[in-house]
Structure formats: structure tokens, C-alpha cells
Amino acid sequence: MCLGIPAQIVDIVDMMKPLTKYTRQIVSADNIPARVREAFRRAEEERPGATHLELPEDIAHEDTDAFVIPASYTRRPLADEKAIARAVDAISNSNRPLLMVGAGANRKTTSKMLTEFVDKLAIPFFTTQMGKGVLDENHPLWLGNAALSDGDFVHRAIDKADCIINVGHDVVEKPPFFMHKGRRTVIHINFFSAEVDTVYFPQIEVVGDVANSVWRLKQRLEPQSHWSFDYFTSVREHLDKHLSQHADDGRFPLHPVRIVAEVRRALPPDGIAALDNGMYKIWFARYYRCRLPNTLLLDNALATMGAGLPSAMAAQLVNPNRKVVAVCGDGGFMMNSQELETAVRLQQQLTVIVLRDDAFGMIKWKQAGMKFPSFGMDMTNPDFVKYAETYGARGHRPKSADELGALLKQTLDQPGVDLIEVPVDYSDNDRILNREIRELSADI
Ligand SMILES: Cc1ncc(C[n+]2csc(CCOP(=O)(O)OP(=O)(O)O)c2C)c(N)n1
Ligand SMILES: [Mg+2]
């Protein structure tokens, strides 16, 4: 109810401050070119991200003779030679170097340089959630993903490494590993210097264009006969065995690993899976083997529910010839499901998987992990098949685990928007993610 209070005015610029790299209100038409150029410059600059301009209606009516400011020619600064030399020495003199590929490595040229780095030096690597796809995870030297915070097979490899080459660590991701006093050398390779805290205090920093740094390291380094990767090989063997478990699990509702396996089987190497945020993200991060950069779109930072469908739609707009799947939980999907109208109107070719557990599964898992009784986590859903149809999309409801694969192949091949409701069985969240992995990895 409004009792004589004037129209509600929100300070949009202030509201956008914590969310964007740059936010300004345009106060005069003469300022538009400068503001627009600056907003784009900041958005594209490392680390790329959103910027925001507010254009008030009265300013939009103003005339101006202001000229458009063209983009400048610019190159990113390169790392200093002495820092490269120090890193080369540390890696050469270590016994078990290990490469970490994080969010900041997810750039086209860096991906190419890292592939050459690994091919030349045969140093094993692991990925963070947002580093997935930078290197081919079918590569025999991939030791897994840091989907869990600790206790996984990959953490055993991290424990044994005496030198971690950390390419593109971004503090927006949860820490992929914890440093302890005097345990090992960490080399921080990034566009920016490291933000030091009690679990991350790298001894060497190579700050500058990441692709160039990786290329220079590769040129200068040679494989060393004292490097010993036997333990890492054993980690990889254990991981391979574990990742394939449940890939053909026939239960219905489906096992999360079966869902990951079916999406992987249905998508070609350059197909794109865009995830919303929920429990399945951990299963996808750990089990889905990315072949190419930006083929598993996920958010390990703010991790906003509701982003899965729009990000799949954007991926489809940018890559009209590639196959795109959105994978959403029932909770997250319902936060932005009206975008189905846009997808249908744009005549997109898109498959949307809605994982149905009638709950906010991820938080249910966390509550249980903290020994709380389940509270406020269960919900009901619309009839997703009918819901899709009201938008002019097609709705599907497989009746067995085996049906999902064929259905995915069919929907990925046909024009238009398809929604597949997939019932998911999260009863293994606790058994596998909290206990089994921990127990098995302790035995390596
Ligand atoms: C906008 C927003 N609100 C709350 C959260 C916290 N959160 C993370 S996962 C999750 C539950 C997700 O439920 P659902 O989409 O059904 O996926 P599920 O875990 O059940 O597979 C919640 C509430 C969030 N990430 N984003
Ligand atoms: Mg759910």
C-alpha cells in the first residue's frame, strides 16, 4: 500500500556496484561516448565481466555533437624474464610437479599453449570447476577435477606434489587446494598477482599474459629424468575406475552419474552443456569429461540459480551450429522458466533437462551434512510436460533410465525447444560424495 509516498526510486548505480566491474549514471549526452567506451574497455579487460550504464530518460532525449571514441590498440603486459627463470628452476628441480588449470586459464590461446605444455613435458594436471575444458579431460594425464573441497582422489595427488604450477587461480572459485606451512612450492601464473591468505601464499608469481607465460615456460623447460609420476599414475587408475561406476546404472529415478554419462554420450565433443546451480553441478564437475574449452558452462562463483536456461540460450545464439543442452534442477528451472517463451520465439534448437527431485536437493544435502533435520526443502512442481507445451515447446517424460539416451539423441537432432523431465535419485549424495570417495582415496 502506498500512502502518499512519491514514486519508488531505486539507486540502480549503487545496486549494481557489488555486481559489476563498473557502473555509472550518464548525466549528460556529451558524456555518452566516453562512458560507453570505458564500459566496454573494462568489460573486455582481464578479468572480463559485466559493466553497467544507467541512461535516464531525460538525458536520452538530449542532442549532442560528441564524437564516438574508437577502441585503442592494446596488448596485455608480459611477465618479467626473471620470474619465468625462477619458475623454470623451481619446476625443473622439483620431483613431482603438478599443473592446476583454473578459471583464468579459460582463454583460447591459453588452452592451446597449455596443451603444448602438457604434450611436451608430460606433467599431470587437474582442473577446477571453471577450468574444465581448457585441456581435454580424456587426456591420460588428467587427474580429476577439484569438484569437492577435499578428500577426493585428486587431493591425494595434490598432497604428494612438491610443486604446483597454478595457472589461472581465481579467488571467485572456492580454493581448489589448501597450502600449509613449508609443504611445497606453489607457482602462481596469472594476469594478476596473488591475493594472499592463510591457505594461499605462493612463493613464486609469474604475473602477465597467461598464454605467453605458459608458452615461455614450455620453451624453456625440458622433461627431467628425476621427475617421478608413479603415484599420480596410480591416482589416475583409481579415478578412472571410480568415474565409470554407475555410468550404466539402471535405477529409476536415475542415478546422477547415469545422467552425466547420458549427456556426455549424446553430445559431440563440441556440444555445450549449460548448468544451472544445484546438486548435479558437483556430479557434472567431477564426472563429466570435457573435451574442448567452454563446453561445460558452470558457475563456481556466485552460482545463481536460474542462470542455466538463459546461459544455454546465449550459448546457442553464439554457436548456432552446435548442440546445446541446459541442465537445470526443478528449483532453479522454475526461477527463470518463462525464458522458454524467448527460446521458442527465437526458434532455438535447444534441449532443456529438468532434474526432478521435488526439492532443493543441494541444500537438503548440506543440511543433512550439518546434522540438521530437513527443513523447508521440499516442494511440488507443475506438470513439466504440459508446462513446456503451453510455451509451444515439446515436453518429454522418459519412463526408464535407458529411454533417456535415445530421447536426448532425438531432441538434439530436431529443431525447436524440447524439455525432458528426468527424475533424479540423490540418495547416493551422502554415500559416495561424503564417504566412499574419502575412504577409497585414503587407500591409494
Ligand atoms: C538465486 C539463488 N538462491 C539460492 C541459492 C542457494 N542454492 C544453491 S543450490 C540450491 C538448491 C537447488 O535446487 P534445484 O534447482 O532443485 O537443484 P537440486 O539441487 O535439487 O538438483 C539453492 C537453494 C542459489 N545458488 N541461488
Ligand atoms: Mg531439485
Image (cartoon, helix red, strand yellow):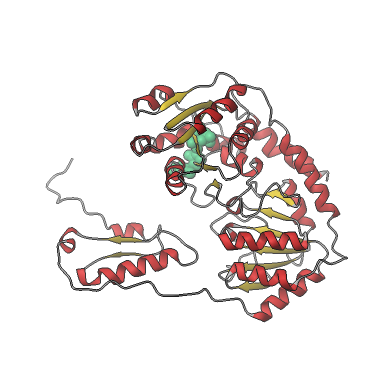
Q: Quadrant of the N terminus?
A: top left
Nearest the viewer among 413 and 226 is 413
Point 82% across, 71% down: residue: 93
Image location (x, y in percent) of residue 231: 84, 52
Q: Residue furthest left?
A: 4
Whether residue 360 is visible, yes or no, is: no
Residue 192 sits above or below residue 413 on the image: below
Residue 295 sits above or below residue 407 on the image: below
Image location (x, y in percent) of residue 347: 37, 36
Q: Residue furthest right?
A: 225
Residue 280 sits above or below residue 314 on the image: above
Image location (x, y in percent) of residue 383: 42, 22
Point 56% across, 47% down: residue: 295
Whether residue 153 is visible, yes or no, is: yes
Image location (x, y in percent) of residue 220: 74, 73
Point 74% across, 59% down: residue: 119
- Locate residue 442: give its quadrant: top right
- Compared across the picture, whether 206 is left or right of 230 comes to left
- Compared across the picture, whether 47 is left or right of 428 comes to left
Numbered circles on residues, count:
0
Point 65% across, 22% down: residue: 251
- Locate residue 59: give its quadrant: bottom left
